[in-house]
Image: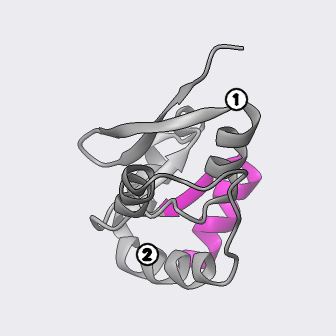
Amino acid sequence: MSARDIIAEAVRRGIRLYPLSNGKIWLQPFDRADTELINRIRTHKPQLLALLRQNSAKRPAKSHRPLSEQERFILAEVEAENDPLTLEALRMFNATVAGIETSDNFARAKLTATAA
């Protein structure tokens, strides 16, 4: 199975894969991935990271508002500064980037919604 096949399988399951600056891959939503898919991702991680980084560089996204220096730093740490889903969540929920949540295999930006 190739890296492209793994990405296609993730897409069929409604999972997006994101390359992170710390060499990890973020799956969103994680609960749709079974052990078999996670093991394939681990096995092909270098090829997946190269392919995902190549693809993410091709599609810069724009934020609904200027991000603060701290927000830009946090998003850059998890390589989400141009991620359309993250930027859409910031816009939809009038959210701010509050920090980074990590686990053994993944890291992601923590967003905090502003009360309406």
Q: Is residue 1 visible?
A: no
Query: Disc 1 designates what residue?
Result: 93
* Quarter of the image with the N terminus in it: bottom right
Q: How far across and how far down the image is residue 14, in percent?
A: 72, 46
Residue at the spot 54% in from the left edge and 32% down from the top edge? 31
| Magenta residues (range) | 1-18
Residue at the spot 52% in from the left edge and 62% down from the top edge? 81
21 sits left or right of 14 in the view = left
Q: How far across and how far down the image is residue 69, in percent?
A: 40, 57
Q: Which mark is residue 4?
A: none
* Quarter of the image with the C terminus in it: top right
Q: Of the residues under marks 1 and 2, which one precedes in the sequence?
A: 2
**SS assignment at label 2:** helix
Is 22 included in the stretch rendered in magenta? no
Badge 2: how crowded within 10 Å, few (<14), some, or many (20+)?
many
Snapshot colouring: one colour
